[in-house]
Image: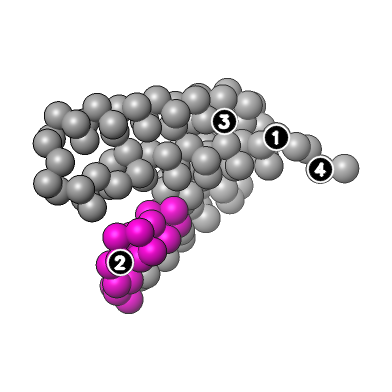
Amino acid sequence: MPSAIPFATIGLLILSNVFMTFAWYGHLKFKTSPLYVVILVSWGIALLEYCFQVPANRIGHGYFNAAQLKTIQEVITLTVFVVFSVFYLGEAFHWKQGVGFALIALGAFFIFTK
């Protein structure tokens, strides 16, 4: 039976990144709101992000090394961001972004090979 650690770690990192993406970029749809308001709301959302990120790293460390945890987090971040930018912000996904993200994924491959 496979360990639950990778599933818990990756699941928590996905939740974490969804919150962080909204904290960092969600305010772009509310450009008329005062900056201090969007900063405070973003900080509140980021607090929720930390409630998932910290346990994910704590659970995952030991099964994954720190470089692997960071790599997983970055790949998830890019994936969540693409979905967010296309469906929430309504921005087009350009092939050049796909190539750039694929190169990052190639780098992730090297992090996980022994």
Q: Quadrant of residue 104?
A: bottom left
Q: Give the mark nearest the N terminus, 2 or 3.
A: 3
Instruction: Identify the residue at horizontal 30%, vertical 47% (top origin).
Output: 26
Q: Which residues are magenta?
A: 78-96
| Majority SS type along the magenta span | helix
Left or right relative to 38: residue 1: right
The answer to whether residue 89 is magenta is: yes
Q: Quadrant of residue 17?
A: top left
Q: Which residue is mark 2?
A: 90
Q: Amino acid at mark 1?
A: Ile
Mark 2 in CB contact with mark 1 (< 8 angstroms) = no
Instruction: Identify the residue at horizontal 66%, vertical 36% (top origin).
Output: 8
Q: Give the mark nearest the N terminus, 2 or 4.
A: 4
Mark 3 in CB contact with mark 4 (< 8 angstroms) = no
Which is more toward the observer, 37 or 8?
Answer: 37
Q: Amino acid at mark 4?
A: Pro
Q: Position of residue 84 (x, y in %)?
A: 38, 57
Q: Is residue 83 above or below residue 28?
A: below
Q: Which residue is mark 1?
A: 5
Q: Give the mark nearest the N terminus, 3 or 4.
A: 4
Separation (CA) of disc 2 from disc 3: 30 Å
Label 3: element kind:
helix
**Does the image show residue 103?**
no
Residue 2: mark: 4
Q: Which residue is mark 3?
A: 56
